[in-house]
Amino acid sequence: MLTGKIFSKVTNLFITVSIAFSISSCSHRDISISTDTINTVKSQSNAVKGQYVVKFKQTLSTATIMELAKNVNATVIKIANRLSSAVLEFSSSSLDLTQQLEALKSDANVEFVEPNYQYKGNYTVNDPKSSQQGGLALAGLAKAWDITMGDPKIIIGIVDTGADLNHPDLKNKLVAGYNVITQGKTPPMDDNGHGTHTAGIAGADTDNKIGIAGAAPKCKVMPVKALDAKGSGDIFNVALGIIWAVDHGAKVLSLSLGGPENETVKRAVNYALLKNVVVVAAMGNDGKNVKAYPAAIPGVIAVGSVDANRSKSDFSNYGNWMSVMAPGSQIMSTLPTYTSTMSEEEFKSKGYDYLDGTSMACPIVAGIAALMLSRNPDYTPAEVKERLESTATHLGKDGFNPEYAHGLVNAAKAVL
């Protein structure tokens, strides 16, 4: 690993830059989080073919209802005496359905007739591990998905250790990426694990009956590998990764890395902002009021971490330059399906596992920013930042405070 100050908190995952970027190790604890609110309402008004609900003026006997149905060549499916209603089904081969319905409506016992609409209420993603993603619920993504699940035209650039390009929960969401380290001679395959994890948080394939759900279900993810198997990478490679992502269509950048101030990364970030690209960065994991860059660069959405109780994670940095908080403690997401540094040295499971860190909070906010741009593609980075901050749920003292910034990100309000 290259030399330089490394964030010392061993239970966190964050990448730090001095002369180089580095990843510290992260802990794994089994945890059960209630995710009742991870469901989102996604109503559909498709009617059951051939079925109509008939409301009677008064409760009728079963025999009377059966006779009425027979008179219009329909079949009784269900009767609800408490509602004075019944569901009738007409043959799909009926050529005179209009006449049958008119005859039904004209019956003296009938108050009204309407199609038997289907409501797909409390829409729940069918990803089996979504029940372990309490962070998505905490950030209000359930309700946000009722408004938008994202636009494939909005690409989230993940400048990190790359991604498992064949992961079943990522492969259909990825656009072409780049390996800065090899100057594009090899694909941006993740040999560490950190990049795959952050990519999954931001935009894992959702409602596909596999694994987890991503914060921006329909937006695309661009993996840019600027860090090696140990999570190390010099600031020049990181800057090149940022610029490459911007030049190749990324609309949001998720930067779960950081360290001391330097002009190289600052110029790359400013290039992104000038190109109207939203930049989201992790605050760092020292648990101190200490600046880490690029999070502290003006215009960047700097993200701290809260736990399942909405309390600041003990590892999360804080300060006046922070924008919002997001869940970063025990976040379930994708990991390489093959042997990587994390599976070998961090004892993480292949495929999926929990990680801690502001690195995990960052891509949640990046995903929310992508949802915002899906609805309002003309938003500037400044407008996205201001809206995220102004709609956040206050924590700690009222209003802005250095420990919790503007509060816990509220995806539903931000998107609405």
Image (cartoon, rainbow, N blue to C red):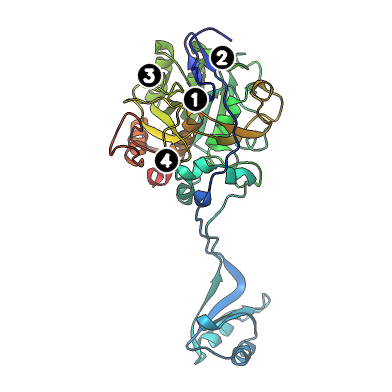
The CA distance from mark 1 to mark 2 is: 13 Å
How many C-alpha atoms fall within 10 Å of the one at disc 1: few (<14), some, or many (≥20)? Answer: many
Kindly identify which numbered label has been placed on residue 232. 2
The residue carrying mark 3 is 291
Check residue 256 in the rendering and tell me which mark sits there, or answer none.
1
Q: Quadrant of the N terminus?
A: top right
Q: Is residue 294 above or below residue 416?
A: above
Query: Where's residue 121, x and y in %?
Result: 53, 60
Q: Nearer the viewer, residue 412 or 313?
A: 313
Q: Quadrant of residue 344?
A: top right
Number of the front mark, 4 or 3: 3
Q: Which residue is mark 4?
A: 372
Residue at 47% across / 88% down in the picture? Answer: 57
Mark closest to the chain's N terminus, 1 or 2: 2
Task: Return the residue nearer the eye: 241 or 62.
Answer: 62
Q: Amino acid at mark 2?
A: Ser
* Marked residue nearer the N-terminal end (3 or 2): 2
- Residue 338, can we see it? yes
